[in-house]
Image (cartoon, helix red, strand yellow):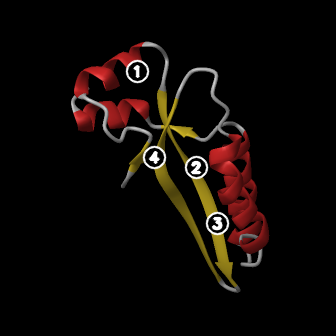
Amino acid sequence: MKIHGIDGMTHEQLQLELQTGSRFVLFQYTISILVMTFRRPSDIYLVRPGESTLSKSIGFTLLTLVAGWWGIPWGPIYTIGSVVTNVRGGKDVTAEVRSSLGV
């Protein structure tokens, strides 16, 4: 999975970002095709303190609202869950990314 926002950063710069409150988040999107529904995670994004996640999550949320609710029965359920996750700022995966990067 790709991590957006860390291009060109050294290990030390990344550590400093995380110490100052930056976090890694991912967003969810849902796509339905009648009886099949797929809920998928986005790539991971580095979000700095005070930075809004709206610009990063809006595309995934709109995709979900248009294409997610069609599948029965899981489409509406997964659509609501994905939208709620995205509106709340995404899913925080900082601990998992830190351990995998060794930061």
Location of mark 2 (residue) = 27
Q: Earlier in the sequence, mark 4 or mark 3?
A: 3
Left or right of 69, for residue 4: left
Residue 89: quadrant of the picture: top right
Left or right of 91, for residue 12: left
Question: Distance from label 4 to label 2 (Cα)?
Answer: 8 Å
**Element type at mark 4:** strand
Location of mark 4 (residue) = 44
Q: Which mark is residue 18?
A: 1
Which of labels 2 and 3 is toward the front?
A: 2
**Element type at mark 3:** strand
Give the residue displayed 73% in from the left and 52% down from the top.
83
Q: Residues within 10 Å of mark 4 (few under 14, many from 20)?
A: many
Amino acid type, mark 2: Phe
Q: Which mark is residue 30?
A: 3
Residue 34 in picture, x, y percent from top left:
71, 86
Q: Earlier in the sequence, mark 3 or mark 1?
A: 1
Left or right of 89, for residue 87: right
Residue 93 in picture, x, y percent from top left:
45, 37
Left or right of 62, for residue 31: left
Whether tag 4 and tag 1 are in contact, CB under 8 A, the answer is no
